[in-house]
Image (cartoon, grey):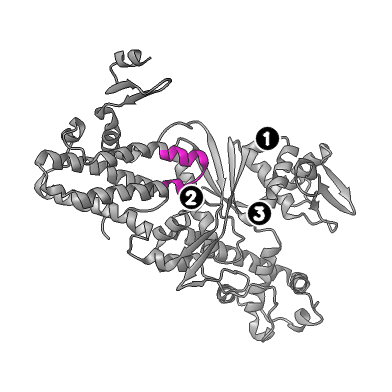
Amino acid sequence: MEQQLTLLNIYEKVESAGPGFINITLKRSDFFSAVHSANKNPENFGTSEKNKGKSIQIEFVSANPTGPLHVGHGRGAAYGDALSRILKSSGYRVEKEYYINDAGRQIDILTASVFIRIYQKEFEDFFPQNAYKGSYISEIGDAFAAKNNPLGIDVLAYINDLPDDEEKEIDEIILRIQKSHGELWSSIKDFALEEVLDSIRKDLKLFNVSFDHWFYESTLGSVSDESSQISSAIDKLKTKQLAYEENGALWLNTNSTGDDKNRVLIRDDGRATYFASDIAYHKDKIDRGFDKLINVWGADHHGYIKRIEASMEGLGFDKERLNVQLVQFANLFKDGKKVKMSTRSGEFFSLADLINEIGTDAARFYYLSKQADQHLDFDINLAKSDSKENIFYYIQYAHARIFSLQKKYLEDHSEEPSDAESVVSGSYASCDKLIHEINKYPEMVLRASASLQPHIIIFYLRDFAQVFHSFYNDNHVFKESDENIQSIIYTLNAAKKVISNGLGLLGIKPMDKM
């Protein structure tokens, strides 16, 4: 075998390394091919067509449209968007979707909260314990009142003889408002929903996150409409005898597929559960023809996976087409103190606040700095520092240093170097470790794509930056010969593109100056 490989004349060296083992040494020119690729086709370096022809739909964020996005939502947003970019780079056709829960109880609570804020003078100090209390509620109420000039109401009709239970209290208020002012209720509901969605869209745009499709839950229809998507999905489950009636409610047999108990689809009062809507929604997604579905959910939804898989199998689809990625909410710390993140209480640090504090790129970087399903403590003070401990700064500084070297080179040369003869020949070997790391990049992107783990890119860039900074500190670039300087800059051009492309896959802009 050793002799046969030697006769191929494509390797630098082939030698026996004991029984059953052969050491193969590549030619320097072959090893350097990655540097050539990065220089000749920089924008596409690291991409592949491995998964060409395959389609993936990724649904992420999908926060209830009841208030601004808080920092807890940021991790799922950064993860879903970065994953989309990485999958595209490996050839997939990717569609990003936001599912808008606009048909449930939380929207009713939002509407009631805004309603009371509109008439707060009449309500005086009264405000339901379970209502949304953020300042944004008052802002929406003021905006609605300015545009619609609502008429006066009888406040006592809403606040007399309310239940002591907080949940029952808000539900009773909702029923009373709907019954007395149905048309006004609908107007406030539509207005509040669009105001909140507009806020969410703006925050996501600021966070460098976009969606191809915004799917409204309300378009699935209701169980009272026999032609709706919800009714169609439930009828199919009934036909397969997986949905059954008990105690006046309709249940789905999910226990048979590993769930800890069966789940309610239609309550005994005729109202559909969130689960029923989710079944219809997933049927809609599969019917659209994607090869694979990825749901990015908070870790608190872990118990929901089995029941969704059961419903997919019940509808005749392979549950393996669905991949649920769980994301732990991040704990945010500032000045050593944990920041609150409760939308309902109104005391929360919004995603927009975080962006204003440290910038989009640093925020995205730290959200992605650990495996998504692992606990993350996010220290704002560290993210703002310019120390080596701040990995974001450390990586960006590598890119800026290379940019500075390029700029200095062009002060004495009319164009960038077109080759690296002394490196390829081996007469200058100080770039070898850097070249070795450049060669790893395309495979690292494929690993991140296959494992659905963007943090792999960050770990790679951290190590890559360390190799570069060591090279920079150990070598006086512009004291070398002209031939070596040309070779170094040519290699560093490729190194800079690796950092730039890697950060780009994370949705982060590389910095030329620090």
Query: Where, by quadrant of the figure, is residue 497 drawn?
Result: top left
Where disc 1 sits, the SS reads loop
Query: Which of the marked residues, 3 or 2, is nearer the chain's N terminus?
Result: 2
Quarter of the image with the C terminus in it: bottom left
Question: Does residue 107 appear anywhere in the picture?
Answer: yes
Position of residue 183 in the picture relative to residue 226 (left or right): left
Report the span colored magenta.
444-457
Tell me how far mark 3 sits from mark 2, CA to CA: 20 Å
Expressed as whole percent of the image width and height from the top left, the position of residue 69 reads: 54, 63
Label 2 amino acid? Asp
| Callout in the foreground (3, 1) | 3
What is the spatial separation of the Cα atoms under label 1 and label 2, in whole angstroms?
26 Å
Give the residue drawn at x 33%, y 60%. Answer: 388
Please tell me whether residue 266 belongs to the stretch shown in magenta.
Answer: no
* Residue type beneath disc 3: His
* Residue 46 seen by the camera: no
Residue to which mark 2 is pinned:
81
Mark 3 highlights which residue? 301
* Residue for point 37% across, 57% down: 392
The residue drawn where x is 50% and y is 45% is 453
Q: Tell me whether circle 3 and circle 1 mark residues in contact (CB < 8 Å).
A: no
Asked whether disc 3 touches disc 2, contact meaning CB atoms under 8 Å apart, the reply is no
Where is residue 446 drawn, in percent x and y? 45, 37
Q: CA distance from mark 3 to mark 1?
A: 21 Å
